[in-house]
Image: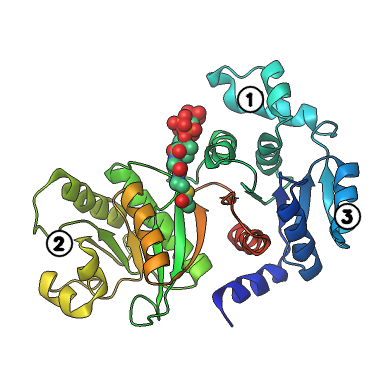
Amino acid sequence: MNLLDLIKENAQKQLKRIVLPEGEEERTLKAADIVLKNGYAEIILIGNPAKIHELATLYGLENITKANIIDPKNFEKEGVYTDLMVQLRIHKGMTKEKAKELIKNPLYLATLMIKNGDADGEVAGANNATGDVLRPAFQYVKTLPGISVVSGAFIMILPEKTFGEDGMLVFADCAVHPDPDDKQLAEIAVATANTARAIARIEPRIAMLSFSTKGSAKHEMADKVISATKIAREMEPSLQIDGELQADAALVEAIGIKKAPGSNIAGNANVLVFPNLESGNIAYKLVERLANAQAIGPILQGMAAPINDLSRGCSVDDIVNMVAITANQAMK
Ligand code: ACO
C-alpha cells in the first residue's frame, strides 16, 4: 500500500471534522463528495446552502447531503466567534464592529470554528492566495507551545530508492517562512521531525543543510545552521540530528564518511532542513522535476491545529489527499 493510501486508511479510523471554507468552489465540492463517500473525514462546507446544493446536483455529487453546511451570512455562532476575535486580538485593536465584518470572510470563519472547538482542521487555497489562507490562521489559531513559527514540509518520494528511507525524504521549510533565524530554524527541525513521524511514518534522521560541512567554510550563514542544530538538540535531546552538512554529505554514505567522519546522520539522512525558504522551495521543485519525484505537500507544521494551504492549480485528488493528511494531523 502506498503512503497516501495508508494516510487515507488511517483517516477512516477516527473521523475528524475538516472545514472547507471554499465550499462553492468546483474542485473543493467534488473533493468533499469523494471524502464523504469514502469516509475519510466529516466535512463542513462554508457557503450558501442553496447554491451548494444546486452545484452538487449540477455536478452529480450524491454525498454532499452528508456535509454540514455553514452559511457565512447567517450562522448561529456569530456572537460567540466575534467575542472570541475581540478577546484574542484586542491588543491589536480588534473591535466588535471589525470582527463582525471579518467573520463574513469564510477564511476567518473557518479559523474561528477551529479555535472554538467546532472543527478539527481546515483545507483551503483552491481559490485564495497563500497569505490570505495563512494570515487568519496565524492570528487566531496560532502556533503550538514551544514553536513560534509555522513552516511547510514536503514528503518527497523518489523513483531512486537508495536515498533517504527507501527513496522517501521529508524536506522543510519549502513553503512558509522566508528567512528564519537560528531559533526558528531549530523549531522548523523539531516540527519537521514530528511530521516525519506522524505523516511520513519514518523515524527522522535530520540533516541541517548548508553550503559548508563541519566547518569547511566560515560564514555567518553556516554559523546560523550550526547554532540551530545546537538549539534543536536542546529542545529535543533525543532527536537524531546533525549539521551543518552539505547535501551530498547528508545523502551519500561515501561522501558523508569523508566529509563528516563520526556523524550518525551524514550519508544517512531522511529529513533535510534547508537554511531558508529560497533554498527549500527551489530544492523541492528541482527534485520533483529533475528526479521525477512525487512531492506530497506542503504539509503545514507548527500550527496549534492543522490548517493546510492548497495550490490554486490543485486537482480534485490533491484536495482529497490534503483533507486526509489534515485529518491524520488532527489525530495527534
Ligand atoms: N509562523 C507563525 N506566525 C507567523 C508567521 C509564521 N511563519 N509569519 C507571520 N506570522 C504572524 C505574525 O507574527 C503576525 O502575527 P500578529 O498579527 O499576531 O502580530 C501575522 O502572522 C501576520 O504577520 P505578517 O508579517 O504581516 O505576515 P504576512 O501576513 O505579511 O505574511 C506570509 C505571512 C504570507 C506567510 C509570508 O511569510 C509569505 O508570503 N511567505 C511566503 C509564502 C510563499 O509564497 N511560499 C512559496 C509558495 S508555496 C509553494 O511553492 C508550495
Q: Residue at x 58, y 59 (%)?
A: 329
Q: Which mark is residue 58?
A: 3
Of residues 116 and 105, the one nearer the viewer is: 105
Labels 3, 2: front one: 3
- At label 2, counting other C-alpha atoms closer than 10 Å, the crowd grade (few under 14, some 14-19, many 20 or more) is many
- At label 1, counting other C-alpha atoms closer than 10 Å, the crowd grade (few under 14, some 14-19, many 20 or more) is few
Instruction: Give the CA separation, mark 3 to mark 1.
Output: 42 Å
Residue 179 position, x and y percent, is: 33, 41
Labels 3, 1: front one: 3
Q: Indicate which disc, 3 or 1, sits on the residue closer to the N terminus.
A: 3
Q: Indicate which disc, 1 or 2, sits on the residue closer to the N terminus.
A: 1
Instruction: Give the CA separation, mark 3 to mark 2.
Output: 58 Å
Q: Residue at x 45, y 57 (%)?
A: 153
**Quadrant assignment, res 39:** bottom right
| Residue position for label 1 | 87
Instruction: Give the CA separation, mark 1 to mark 2.
Output: 48 Å
Q: Are marks 1 and 2 in contact (CB under 8 Å)?
A: no
Residue 14 position, x and y percent, is: 71, 66
Q: Indicate which disc, 3 or 2, sits on the residue closer to the N terminus.
A: 3
The quadrant of the picture occupied by the C terminus is bottom right
| Residue position for label 2 | 213
> Helix or strand or loop: what does disc 3 sit on?
helix
Q: Amino acid at mark 2?
A: Thr
Of residues 284 and 151, the one nearer the viewer is: 284
